[in-house]
Image (tube, grey):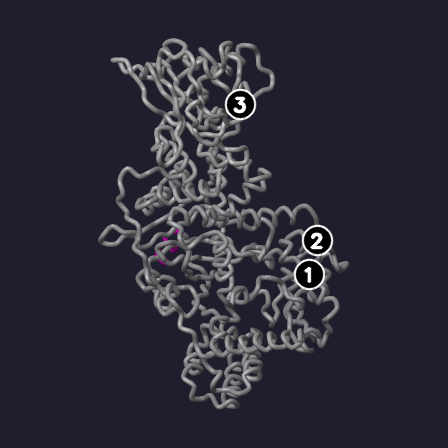
Amino acid sequence: MESLNSVVGSNEQIKEPHVINVSDSDFGEDGMDEVSSIPFQSPGGGMYWKPRVEAEFKPYINQSFRSLEDGIEFYRDYGRKSGFEIRRHTEKKHEDGTVLLKHIVCSIAGRNESKMNVDYEDFSSSSKKRRRTHSHFLVSGSGKQFLKSNRVLGLAYKKLVFDGAKANMGPNKTYNFAKELCGSYSNVGATCTEFKNWSRYVKLYIGDRDAQMIIEKFTDKKEMSDGFFDDYAVDEDGRLTRIFWTDVIRRRNYDVFGDVISFDSTYSTNKYNIKFVLFTGLDNYKKCVVFAAGLIAKEDIDNYVWIFEVFMKCMIREPKCIVTDQCPAMKQAIPTVFTETRHRLCMWHIMKKFNQKLAKCISKMDDFKRKINALIWIIDIDPATFEVGWKDVIKEYKLESNEWLCELYNIRESWIPAYYADDPLAGLLRTTSISESENSFFDKFNRRSDTLTEFYLRYESAMEKQRHTNARLNYEGTKSMPRMDGPLLLERDAAELYTRTMFYEVQKEIMSSCYDMSINSISEEDGVKIFSLKDKKRHGKIFEVKHAYLNNDVQCMCRLFEKMGIVCRHGFFALNQADVTKIPRHLVVNRWTKGAEMRHSLQFKEISEQCNAIEVTNRLDGERLDYLEGKLKELKHSLRESSLKSDTQNKNDVMEFFVGSKIPAEVIVKPPIEGRNKGCGRRIVGDYEKSISQRKKKCSESRFTALNLDSV
C-alpha cells in the first residue's frame, strides 16, 4: 500500500505548497530508482512485485503538488502506467477541516487474504525504509487497457455515441467505428461496456420526464423562432396523448409545394407505440418533403380531427388534394376539417388487394389484372369510357355479385383517375408512395425503444439530411447546364427555368414535339390557331391544341399542363410553329422552377443566426497577450474546479448539452401510456400470402434437392 501525506485547506485553496512524504526505501538511500519488474521473495517466503515505469512518472521524496487532487491524479496516472488501480483510503483532518494526511492505496489492499493475495505495507512512522511492493501480479502491457482508470469515456466519444444513435448506430457499432478511427481497440481508451453504459444513461437521464422535456424543448424553440409551431393535448391523468410540431422552413415549403399532400401513419417509432403521422408532399425535384409531423395515441376520429385542425391553424390554407389509405377514421375526419379539399384514396393499397380478394374467384388472374389495369391507371380516358369498360370486364369474368368489387365501384370517384383528371395537378400523386418512402426513410434513424426526446432528435437528424439533399441538388443545378438534345431555344429557356429533374421531363416533351408530331389539320378562329395533331408515341391518337396569338396561351385536350404543371408536346409544337423562343411565363408553374421555395406568398420571418463568428486578429500586442494568458489561466482553474464536481452532476451537464433539454424542475405533462394500435400486434396472414409462402418454400426445397443431386 502506498501513502500520500498532504496538507490542503477544506475549501481546496492552497495555503502553502503541499508536500507528499514518500518513504525512501522505494528509491534507495540516494533516492535513485531501483524499481524492478522481476518478482522477488520476502524472508517470510511470500512473493512480491515492484512496478516499473518511466522516471518522469515515478514519485520522489518531497514531491509537491498544487492541490490534493493534483497529487491524487498523479498517483492515479502512476498506477495506470504501473499496472494497478488506486483508491482513496484514510485521512486525517485539522479541527478547521484542513486535510493533514491522506493515504492512497492499491485498489485490492486490505482484502481477505484467504481469497486473494493482498499488499503488505509498513506504516511505522519511525521506519526509514518502507517497501512499495504488491503481493499480486501487476497488469501486463496488453492488459492495462482494461484497468478501470484506463477505461474512461472521453467527451468526444460520448458525443460520438450520442450522434451515432441519431444515425441508428448502436453502441456496439459505434465502438467498432471508434476502433477504426483510432487504429486499434487499445487506442480507444474504453471498452464496449463504457459505450453501452453511456447509451443507457441517456434513457436514465430522460426517465419519466420524457413528455415534459419535449414540451419544454418546443417552448424554447418558439422563443428562438417565431415560425416554430407546436400544440399538444393530455388526458385527465395529465398524460400526453397527442402532439404536433413544425418549423418555419416546413411551413414555407407547404406554402410552395403543399397543393397535393399525402397523409399516413406509421408505428414502431417509439417505446410508447403511439402513431407517428406525417404530412408529406413533393418538392421541385420530385423529392419527398415533410410539412409537419405529429404523434397520436390512437387512430380514431377524435385524434385525426384534432391533428387536422391544428394543421389548419398552423398552415392557414387547405391543400387542394389529400391522398390517404382506406382508414375509416381518416375518411370521416378529413371532410370535417378540410371542407374544400378533395380526398383521394391510394390506388396502390387498393390494387394490391385484388389478388387477396379475387384469387379464389378468377382462374386467369393475370389476364383479368391486365384488362382492369388498362382502365384504372390510364388518366386520359373519360368517366363514361371507364364505366363501360369496367362493366364489360366484370361481366366477362362473372363478378357482378362480388361485394368487394361493387363497393370499389361505388367509391370510384375517390380513386379512379378518370374522375379527377380535371383537378389541378391531378397526376402528381395517385398513391401514398411518398408517405411509405418517408416511413422507410425514418426507419433508418429511429428505433422502437426510443423515448420521445430521443425520437425528436432522430427526427431532426432525418430532416437535416432531407435539407442537405435539397441543397446539393440546388448546387448541382446552378454549377452547370444540362445537355441540350435539340436546336430549339425553347429547350435552353427551359433549362434556365426548371430544376434539373423537371427539365428532363420538359425536354422529352420538347423533343417529342419535334419528331413525333404530324399535322392532321390547321384552322384559325378569332385569333386562335387550332392544330389537329397526330401523335406517333400515342399510337396515332389525334390531339387538338389551341394557340392564342395575343398572349401565346396554349390549351390541349391531353390536359398535361393541368395534370402535371408542364406544357405538353402538342403545346410546344404550336409554340414552335409560331416561332416562340421562350416559354410563356404564365405557363411556368412556380413549384417546378429553380429557387421555388424562395418565392412564397406568406411572409415568414427570417431565422436569425444564434451566434456570431468571433474573429481573432493575428497581430496581438504585449498587453493583449498578457490579457489572453490571464484568461486562459482562469479558464484552466475553473475547469479544474468543475472536474471536482460529482460524477453524476458532470454527466447531467454533458447530457443537457447533448440533448438540449434541462432536467425539468417540475413534471406537469406525464409520458403517454403504451398504446395498442393497428400493426402493433401479430398480423393475421391471409390465404393468398400463405399460398405465396408455401410456393416459395417448395421452390427452395426443389432447388436444394437439385443441388444435392448435382453433388452426387
- In depth, the one of 662 and 538 nearer the eye is 662
Q: Position of residue 326 (x, y in %)?
A: 41, 70
Residue type pointed to by label 2: Pro
Q: Vertically, is 23 above or below 520?
A: above
Cβ atoms under marks 1 and 3 closer than 8 Å: no
Residue type pointed to by label 3: Ser
Q: Secondary structure at mark 2?
A: loop
Query: Which residue is at a point 47% across and 87% down the rendered structure image?
Result: 361
Tell me which numbered mark, 2 or 1, is placed earlier along the sequence: 2
Cβ atoms under marks 2 and 1 closer than 8 Å: yes
Residue type pointed to by label 1: Gln
Q: Which residues are magenta?
A: 307-314
Q: Residues within 10 Å of mark 1 (few under 14, many from 20)?
A: many
Q: Nearer the viewer, mark 1 or mark 3?
A: 3
Q: Please name the residue that numbered disc 2 is placed on.
A: 482
Locate residue 207: give its quadrant.
top left
Q: Please name the residue that numbered disc 1 is placed on.
A: 507
Locate residue 112: give its quadrant.
top left
Q: Position of residue 531 (x, y in %)?
A: 68, 72
> Marks 2 and 3, Cα distance to the nearest angstrom?
74 Å
Q: Secondary structure at mark 1?
A: helix
Circle number at residue 36: 3
Circle number at residue 18: none
